[in-house]
Image (spheres, grey):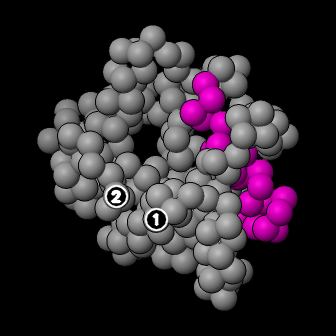
């Protein structure tokens, strides 16, 4: 599918559904997705669209997000259903598929896992996950480190990101979804194997 002809339509839709701040974030993530797609030879159009649409349901009511997440039939764990901050991702993937008619499984999966993560992600999934935490509007303490690292080695950046995410969740006494644990384990094993082979 040629997504480019739909970009403006999707941008207008997002403008009507999101606050100015969230809309700006979506544009920034889309641009970062393109930068990473160029760096790693991924599909730039698909990466841009994933970035553009990833938070499409972020400002829904919690109950609506949860309902859509359950309807998505995207392997939502009990732990994810206990964590409202994660609901917008599968809800967004469901909305994109059912309301926008986008059936690209990689794009939908990228949106579904852009907050919780997963093991052995595809290149588009990795790009969206990292772009969401390194977009131009982000200003947390280590963001510059992640921005630099993601352009050098996306898998190493994922290892550091998941390590940080697990520590944050433990610090907040939050449950950790199985997909996040799988992501942490996968990229930790990869990190350790690469260290051994050096």
Question: Which residue is under mark 2?
Answer: 137
Classify 172 as above or below 119: above
> Does the segment drawn in magenta span residue 185?
no
Q: Which quadrant: the C terminus?
A: top left
Q: Which quadrant: the N terminus?
A: bottom right
Q: Which of marks 2 and 1 is nearer the N terminus?
A: 1
Residue at (53, 47) in percent of width and height: 114
Give the CA separation, mark 2 to mark 1. Answer: 8 Å
Determine whether the residue tagged by mark 2 lies in a helix, strand or loop.
loop
Residue at (62, 48) in percent of width and height: 58
Q: In which quarter of the image is residue 105?
A: bottom right
Of residue 15 and residue 178, the one placed in the foreground of this image is 15
Q: In which quarter of the image is residue 74?
A: top right
Q: Where is residue 125 in the image (x, y as percent from the top left)?
A: 52, 54
- CB atoms of marks 2 and 1 within 8 Å: yes
User: Which segment is the magenta one?
Assistant: 83-104
Q: Residues within 10 Å of mark 1 (few under 14, many from 20)?
A: some
Q: Position of residue 55 (x, y in %)?
A: 59, 54
Residue 57 numbered tag: none
- Position of 5 with respect to 122 (left or right) is right
- Position of 111 with respect to 42 (left or right) is right
- Position of 17 with respect to 131 (left or right) is right
Q: Is the magenta stretch mostly helix, strand or loop?
A: helix
Q: Let me know if residue 86 appears in the view.
A: yes
Residue sitting farthest toward the top: 173
Question: Which residue is under mark 1?
Answer: 24
């Amino acid at each position: 599918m040629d997504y480019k002809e739909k970009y403006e339509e999707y941008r207008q839709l997002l403008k009507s559904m999101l606050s100015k701040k969230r809309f700006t974030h979506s544009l920034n993530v889309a641009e970062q997705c393109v930068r990473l797609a160029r760096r790693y030879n991924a599909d730039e159009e698909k990466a841009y669209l994933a970035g553009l649409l990833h938070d499409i349901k972020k400002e829904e009511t919690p109950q609506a997000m949860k309902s859509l997440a359950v309807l998505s039939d995207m392997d939502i764990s009990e732990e994810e259903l206990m964590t409202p901050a994660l609901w917008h991702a599968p809800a967004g993937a469901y909305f994109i598929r059912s309301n926008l008619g986008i059936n690209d499984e990689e794009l939908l999966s990228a949106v579904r896992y852009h907050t919780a993560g997963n093991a052995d992600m595809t290149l588009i999934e990795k790009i969206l996950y990292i772009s969401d935490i390194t977009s131009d509007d982000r200003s947390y303490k280590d963001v510059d480190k992640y921005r630099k690292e993601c352009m050098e080695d996306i898998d190493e950046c994922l290892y550091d990101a998941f390590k940080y995410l697990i520590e944050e969740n433990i610090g907040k006494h939050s449950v950790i979804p199985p997909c996040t644990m799988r992501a942490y384990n996968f990229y930790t094993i990869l990190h350790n194997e690469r260290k051994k082979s050096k």
